[in-house]
Amino acid sequence: MTRFMHIWVLLARQWFLVRNQIVDSIINYMFVWPALFSCTSGYLVPRAFFPHDAIMKGTELILGVLFLQFFVISYFALVELLNERDESRVLHYHVQVTSYTATFISRLLFYTTYTYCMVLPLLPMSKLFLGSNVFTDHARWGALIVVLFLVSLTVVSYVFCVFCAITAIRYLEYAWSWSVEPVLWLSGMWVPSYVLLQSTLPGIRYFVYCNPFAYVTESIRLIFFHDVQFASLSFCCGVMIVSTILFSLMSYVLLRRQLSAV
């Protein structure tokens, strides 16, 4: 019971830190970004490059933007983790007065929930802005809510792991280039995974099959299109669950090592 109380107090503390920015976040993530991405990725770009299949391609591009937002939002939010570890040393203090487990779980839960809430409005608002120009005839909105939370868990646990592996904040500029972009661009974000597998580039099939985020993007696409050409929705969700557990365990060990080394 004491550990749950510690987690709850630390979650409340995290909320206190971001509550003054929540209005700006709501405006950006609920109105500005959906409007911007809807007009560009969902309408202008597909009509310029895919005039005969603009609605389908526009929907796929919006789904790619949706996945990208999980990485962007979680990445910039989790920068605070490095500040708390290396600059203010708040993490060390929280570990001493509560426990390492409570400190770790509270951060992981908070950033997962925060990222999820910030990304969730993008698709409904895009549909509101574009109407029938977004293909949602077969969309399973209930399943989407569940799958997107699982996506948030997977992405945040991975970014958390990347930041725990960084030994100093000065290496932050390399984290995105070396740890995020490779898995991001070959995840099926813009081009579906089954299309990537048709490439003759050496090693591309191995990289796609072993990239857990290929299954993340496929799970989002299957919510809207249902045509299984890479992996089923249940298999994709299974991969995300396993990946989340592995990334979280790695983060736990790496962060503990970083805190013990200082």
Image (cartoon, helix red, strand yellow):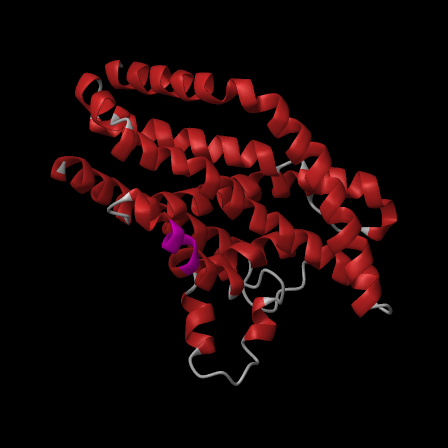
- Most common secondary structure along the magenta stretch: helix
Residue located 26% across and 19% down the image = 3
Residue located 56% across and 74% down the image = 196
- The location of residue 123, given as percent across then percent down, is 70, 42
Q: Which residues are magenta?
A: 173-177
| Image quarter in which the N terminus is found | top left
| 118 and 215: which is toward the camera | 118
- Up the image or down, 240 lies above or below 91; here it is below
| Image quarter in which the C terminus is found | top left
Q: Residue furthest left?
A: 261
In this picture, residue 244 sits left or right of residue 71? left
In this picture, residue 187 sits left or right of residue 51? left
Quadrant position of residue 258: top left
Residue located 72% across and 48% down the image = 37
Q: Is residue 176 magenta?
A: yes
- The location of residue 218, given as percent across then percent down, is 57, 59
Residue located 26% across and 35% down the image = 86
Visible in this render: residue 177?
yes
Visible in this render: residue 135?
no
| 118 and 2: which is toward the camera | 118
- The location of residue 185, given as percent across then percent down, is 53, 63
In this picture, residue 83 sits left or right of residue 199? left
| 77 and 140: which is toward the camera | 77
- The location of residue 109, given as percent across then percent down, is 41, 31
- Up the image or down, 253 lies above or below 48; here it is above
| 6 and 82: which is toward the camera | 82
- Up the image or down, 122 lies above or below 242; here it is above
